[in-house]
C-alpha cells in the first residue's frame, strides 16, 4: 500500500493517543489547597508504552486519574484519543490491588469485561479462553478468584483490561504488592502482550528497574508538585530477545543508571 499523505505532519499530530497540555492539578481550595501536579505537558504517541516514575506523593496517580477522566485538571487540557476523557470509556484500568468479583470464577471475571464492552454471550465464550491463554491462566479458568494466588489475581485484572479493545491501557503500580519473582514474570507477560498490540500504555511505578524494562519511554517526575524531570526514549529491543538477556545487557544497565540518577535528583529537589 502506497498512499501519499500530503498532510503527513497533521496526521502525525492527530495520532497522539494522550495529550497533556500545561496541566496543573490542585486538591482543595484556599489556604488548604494542595498542588499535586504540574505544570506538566506530555504528548504520548499511539502504540507507545509510557512509564511514569517518581517518589511516593509526586502526583503519578493524579496524572493517571486525569488521563482516565476521573478528575478534570484545575488548569490546562487533557485529551485521550483526541477528546476529553470520560471515566469508564476508552481506557482499560489496572490498579495496585486487583478489583475482582469474588463470587465469579476467573473466566467469569474476564467475561464481565467483555460484557461491559457490549459483546454477546457467544462472543464472550469464544474470547475468554483466548485471553486466559494470553496471560497464562487457562488451567485456573473455573476457580474462584480467592482460590488463586495474588499474582494470578493480578493477571486476571490484566486479562480483563485487555479483554476490552480499548486503545488505551492505564496501569497504576499494578505489581507493587507482589513478591519479586512473580513481579518479574508479570513484567515479562505485560511486555510481551503489549508489544505490537497497537495499544498505548501508561504505566505508573516507583521502580526504576520496572520502568526501564517495560517502557518504550520513561518520564521521571519531580517530587510534589510533579513536573517532568526527565523524558527518555528507551531504545531496547521489544521482540526476539529473552528477558534475562535483556536484563543482563549493558544497554539496560546504562539506561537504569540514567533513570536511577534522575529519580534520586528529582526526589531531592
Ligand atoms: N483526593 C485528594 N485530596 C487531597 N489531596 C490529595 C488527594 N489525592 C492525592 N492528594 C495529594 O496529592 C499528592 C499526589 O498524590 P498522588 O497523585 O496519589 O501521588 P503518587 O501516586 O505519586 O503517590 C499527594 O501529596 C497526596 O497527598
Ligand atoms: Mg499513586
Image (cartoon, rainbow, N blue to C red):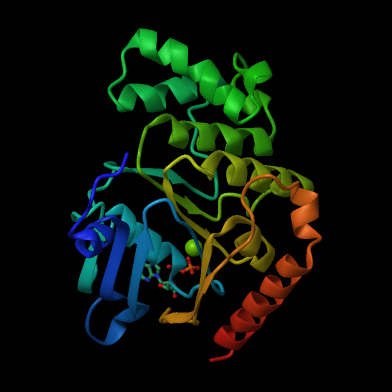
Where is residue 229? Give x, y as percent: 49, 83
Name the residue furthest top: 122
Snapshot quadrant of residue 125 = top left
In percent of width and height, residue 88 lies at 29, 42
Q: From this viewpoint, is residue 116 visible?
A: yes
Q: How many marks?
A: 0
| Horizontal side of residue 231 vs 133, given as left or right | left
Foreground of the two, 25 or 136: 136
Residue 255, x across and y down, in percent: 67, 72
Q: Who is closer to the viewer here, 23 or 105? A: 23
> What residue sits 55% from the left and 85% below the top?
266
In the picture as drawn, the residue positioned furthest to the bottom comes out as 269
* Residue at horizontal 34 percent and vertical 77 percent from the top: 40
Who's the residue at 49% across and 18% down the image? Answer: 128
User: Is 80 above or below relative to 120?
Assistant: below
Up-down relation of residue 154 to residue 118 (above or below): below
38 or 167: nearer the eye? 167
Residue at 76 percent of width and 46 percent of height = 242
Q: Is residue 207 above or below residue 33?
A: above
Amino acid at each position: 500500500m502506497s498512499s501519499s499523505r500530503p498532510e503527513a505532519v497533521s496526521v502525525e499530530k492527530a495520532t497522539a493517543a494522550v495529550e497533556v497540555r500545561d496541566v496543573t492539578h490542585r486538591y482543595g481550595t484556599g489556604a488548604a489547597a494542595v498542588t499535586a501536579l504540574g505544570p506538566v505537558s506530555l504528548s504520548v504517541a499511539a502504540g507507545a508504552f509510557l512509564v511514569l516514575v517518581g517518589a511516593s506523593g509526586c502526583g503519578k496517580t493524579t496524572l493517571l486519574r486525569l488521563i482516565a477522566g476521573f478528575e478534570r485538571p484545575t488548569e490546562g487540557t487533557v485529551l485521550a484519543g483526541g477528546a476529553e476523557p470520560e471515566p469508564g470509556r476508552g481506557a482499560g484500568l489496572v490498579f495496585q490491588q486487583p478489583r475482582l468479583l469474588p463470587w465469579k470464577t476467573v473466566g467469569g471475571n474476564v467475561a464481565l469485561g467483555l460484557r461491559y464492552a457490549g459483546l454477546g454471550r457467544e462472543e464472550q465464550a469464544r474470547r475468554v479462553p483466548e485471553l486466559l491463554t494470553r496471560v497464562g491462566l487457562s488451567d485456573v479458568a473455573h476457580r474462584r478468584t480467592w482460590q488463586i494466588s495474588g499474582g494470578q489475581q493480578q493477571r486476571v485484572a490484566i486479562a480483563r483490561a485487555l479483554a476490552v479493545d480499548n486503545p488505551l491501557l492505564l496501569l497504576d503500580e499494578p505489581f507493587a504488592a507482589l513478591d519479586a519473582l512473580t513481579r518479574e514474570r508479570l513484567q515479562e507477560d505485560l511486555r510481551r502482550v503489549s508489544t505490537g498490540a497497537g495499544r498505548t500504555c501508561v504505566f505508573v511505578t516507583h521502580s526504576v528497574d520496572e520502568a526501564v524494562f517495560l517502557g518504550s519511554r520513561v518520564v521521571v517526575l519531580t517530587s510534589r508538585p510533579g513536573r517532568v524531570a526527565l523524558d527518555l526514549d528507551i531504545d531496547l529491543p521489544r521482540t526476539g530477545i529473552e528477558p534475562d538477556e535483556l536484563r543482563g545487557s549493558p544497554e539496560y544497565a546504562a539506561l537504569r543508571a540514567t533513570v536511577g540518577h534522575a529519580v534520586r535528583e528529582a526526589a531531592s529537589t
